[in-house]
Amino acid sequence: MAVESCGDFYALPEDCIANALSLTSPKDASRLSLVASTFRSAAQSDAVWERFLPSDYRQIISRCIDGPDSLLVKSKKDLFLYLCEHPILIDSGLKSFSLEKWSGKKCFMLSARDLYIMWGDTAQYWKWISLPESRFPEVAELLDVCWFEIRGKINMNMLSPATNYAAYLVFTCKSRTHGFEHQPAEAWVGVSGHEAEKRTVCLDPDGAQRQRYQIVPRRIGLLYHRLTRLHGHQQDNVPPIEQNTQYPKPRDNGWMEVELGEFFVEEGQDGDLEISLMEVKGGNWKSGIIVQGIEIRPK
């Protein structure tokens, strides 16, 4: 009976199978296309991949800095896969847009130029440079600041509804960074006008390793050693950073990212999603990181 039922399904018109596939997900449609030639043909149809693309994809693509005609694709499936692998610059190059491959959910990155960076336009503290490995024309290099503060925002209706998102600072470092070793930053992600949960974030690229092995930087270590000898105590490890601290992780493209917080986008939710990152308590000077932007993607 099961075999006959399966045979009856294969006998359905291709457009009926395509309609059924469009009610699944990109991941499921790709898997089912391997089952039989009937599925494979239906899974190529524009009707399927039109459903997987965001409902406002045409409006977003129209904001591409190179124009919508720059996307040389022949089918809706090609467009979907292109947007998964090649983020496009929109809004005068201040943001990038892409799709999450397995779900088709929308992803955005706010460029450093689209962020509020305290003292960002003061040449003494920050420097705007170009890096060939960045998707944006400019990135922000931290020269030396005591007050470290970065803020960004995006309207919630730009994001995919009924989706859990997370925000990530995307950055890299020069050969030497300073000031982030033992004073973590604080991050908040939440809807404008509502209280957001604070998260502790380490911006030291070697922070996870330092915490694991309790490595003390040389200058701090010598000072701490002298103080403990002066007071007649044994030298202990530097007190650990909070257990739930977020540490930088490598990305596939050579950059690093650290999670700043997560949030759930409700159906029909409006208002600005605000993202903040600050380190102002330590009083020490900080330098050496290069900020590409803040990425907002499904988690």
Image: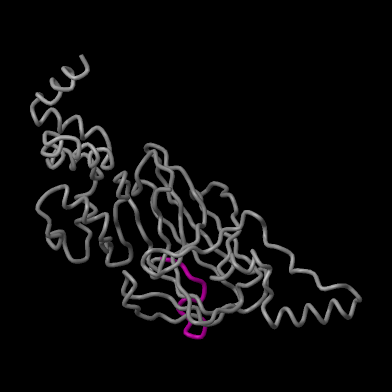
Q: Residue at x 51, y 50 (%)?
A: 190
Which of the pair 283/84 is nearer the observer?
84
Q: Main secondary structure of the magenta part?
A: loop
Residue at left offset 10%, top offset 31%: 15
- For the N terminus, the quadrant is top left
**Residue 102 lies within the magenta run:** no
Viewer-proximal residue among 149 and 238: 238
- Residue visible at 22% across and 59% down in the picture: 63
What x and y, as percent, mark residue 99?
Answer: 29, 52
Along the horizontal axis of the image, is 41 left or right of 103? left
Q: Is residue 140 above or below residue 61?
A: below
Magenta segment includes 122:
yes
Q: Is residue 245 above or below residue 219?
A: above
**Residue at image point 43% right, 51% down:** 272
Q: Is residue 89 left or right of residue 264?
A: left
Residue 177 found in image quarter: bottom right
Q: How is the image coloured?
A: one colour
Image quadrant of residue 33?
top left
Q: Position of residue 194 (x, y in %)?
A: 54, 46
Of residues 24 and 108, the one drawn nearer to the viewer in this rendering: 24
Residue 211 rendering spot, x and y as whole percentages: 65, 65
Q: Is residue 234 left or right of residue 188?
A: right
**Which span is picked out in magenta?**
115-125
Q: Residue furthest right?
A: 232
Number of disc labels: 0
